[in-house]
Image (cartoon, grey):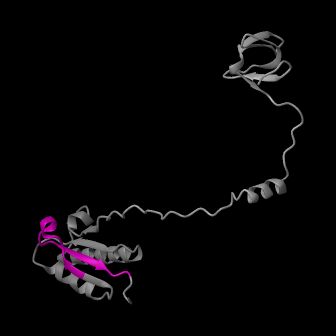
Amino acid sequence: MIEVGDKVSVLDEDITGDVVRLEHGEAVIMSDDGFELSFPVNELVRVMTGDMTLPSYEEVHKNLQEKEHFKKKTKRPVVKPKKQQAPPMEVDLHIHKLVKSSRGMTNHDMVNLQLDTAKRQLDFAISKRIPVVIFIHGVGQGVLKEELKYLFGRYDNLSISDGDYKKYGLGAMEVYIKQNPNN
């Protein structure tokens, strides 16, 4: 209840002042700027005046403990989004993908470059814990395919199969890298 002499503030406006008189549901206030203004009583809020002291940390802490605000919250299980299956790493060993021009290269040079690329990419996949690598070797006389089988056979933690026929035909190998070969 607002009375004469109260310090008030007007809702929704930046006006404060002292109530000078009350008449017919309206309050006449003397604003802090020195103007007499009239507002409906229900649009005014009493402003508390006087010295304000903040409670000490100990008082606040004690009150919070008394009111048991420190109850442990029950943890909800964290729902992790399903891991999206990352597409397998593909390494295209076709010679035109590895060099701008194979002009002047012998077949031996080309196969060695392709094998070096395959070994480097396989070592990279192992170091980055990539589980599946597809080596696209193409269909030809089968020399590169046989050399790749020999290369991959020197690793203990690999499992080799033909690549997806629908996608690669007969020209790819799928290499599965076992992440924990001892288990």
Position of residue 19 relative to residue 116, above or below, is: above
Residue visible at 39% across and 75% down in the picture: 129
Q: Quadrant of the C terminus?
A: bottom left
| Residue 40, image x, y percentages | 70, 15
| Residue 54, image x, y percentages | 84, 45
Quarter of the rendering containing residue 171? bottom left
Q: Is residue 1 magenta?
A: no
Q: Is residue 102 visible?
A: no
Residue occupying the far left of the picture:
141
Position of residue 142 relative to residue 27, above or below, is: below
Quarter of the rendering containing residue 170? bottom left
Q: Is residue 54 visible?
A: yes
Residue visible at 84% across and 48% down in the picture: 55
Count of numbered circles on the image: 0
143 to the left or right of 42: left
82 to the left or right of 17: left
Position of residue 45 relative to residue 166, above or below, is: above
138 vs 68, nearest the viewer: 68
Residue visible at 39% across and 84% down in the picture: 180
Quarter of the rendering containing residue 29? top right
140 to the left or right of 114: left
Chain part drawn in magenta: 160-179
| Residue 157, image x, y percentages | 33, 85
Q: Quadrant of the N terminus?
A: top right
105 vs 173, nearest the viewer: 173
136 vs 94, nearest the viewer: 136
| Residue 38, image x, y percentages | 74, 11
Q: Is residue 166 magenta?
A: yes
28 vs 34, nearest the viewer: 28
Residue occupying the far right of the picture:
51
